[in-house]
Image: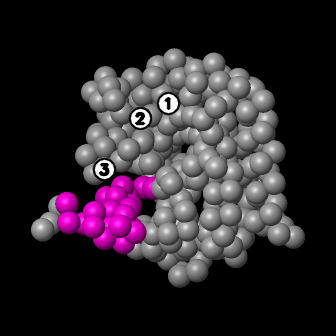
Amino acid sequence: MGILNITPDSFSDGGKFFNTKAALNHAEEMIKAGADIIDIGGESTRPGSESVSENEELDRVIPVVDGILEKYPDAVISIDTTKRAVALEALKRGAAIINDISGLTFEPEIAEVVAQFDANLVIMHIKGTPKDMQLKPDYSDVVLEVYEFLEKQSNFAKAKGVKKIIIDPGIGFGKKVSHNYELLKNLNVFKLFGYPVLIGLSRKSFLGKSLNLEVNERDTATVIAETLALKNGADIIRTHNVKNAFESRQIHLNFMNPQSSEKNNV
């Protein structure tokens, strides 16, 4: 899952793809690099970020959805949003996944929209909101509490008619550095749900704090963490550097099934 932020203030690539042409060019680069999914976001969810209006978010993302699907009709588009109106319009235009970082806590009505279109829904764990989530995150048992939240919210989604659920433990969303590593270490626990597990580790601050690295220096740490996530059961890797993640996945597949490597090189 390649990340495409149509924002001026996202923590890693804010402003780089803010205009539609730049966004479409980057989407094409990621598709050619091996992305199976393009995850489009029109509102920054970095720590401390402010929300934007529905109209502003729609103006940012919808032209990009249209542009990608016009050139790549079979592309799988995910929309990173917590707003029902944005989810509805994106699904009308051909998006296949709604990625809700609030886990249906900001606008629960998103579940009904997803069910209406028989789309996929990513339910992510967050503690608080992007504006305040990193002020004082605390847990008695982070793995258990995240698990219980995802169980509750996925059951709510199913009750609303959602049939295709993906879960995300929410690395970096209301978590201390140690919490993120604990979740990564115990990622296989979340396989018990029977849903695909998505993980977003790309260039996040817990990697930077661990190694004293600025955002633009975290790609090596990212691909190592993503490889560990694959080893521990992640099904979808949400990332900025698609080429690195694609190669990591291929090596992991070859590691798990050595015979598969013979298909490409006798």
| Residue for point 81% across, 54% down | 148
**Residue at horizontal 33 percent and vertical 62 percent from the top:** 250
Residue at (63% x, 73% y) in the render: 185
SS assignment at label 1:
loop
For marks 1 and 2, give the CA distance.
Answer: 6 Å
**SS type, badge 3:** loop
Q: How many marks?
A: 3
Residue under circle 2?
A: 76
Residue annotated with mark 1: 96
**Contact check, label 3 and label 1, Cβ < 8 Å:** no
Residue 33 located within the stretch drawn in magenta: no
Q: Can see residue 19?
A: no
Of the two numbered discs 3 and 1 on the same chain, state the one appearing first in sequence.
Answer: 3
Task: Give the residue type at disc 1.
Answer: Ala
Q: Write down the region rendered in magenta.
A: 238-263
Magenta portion: prevailing SS class: helix
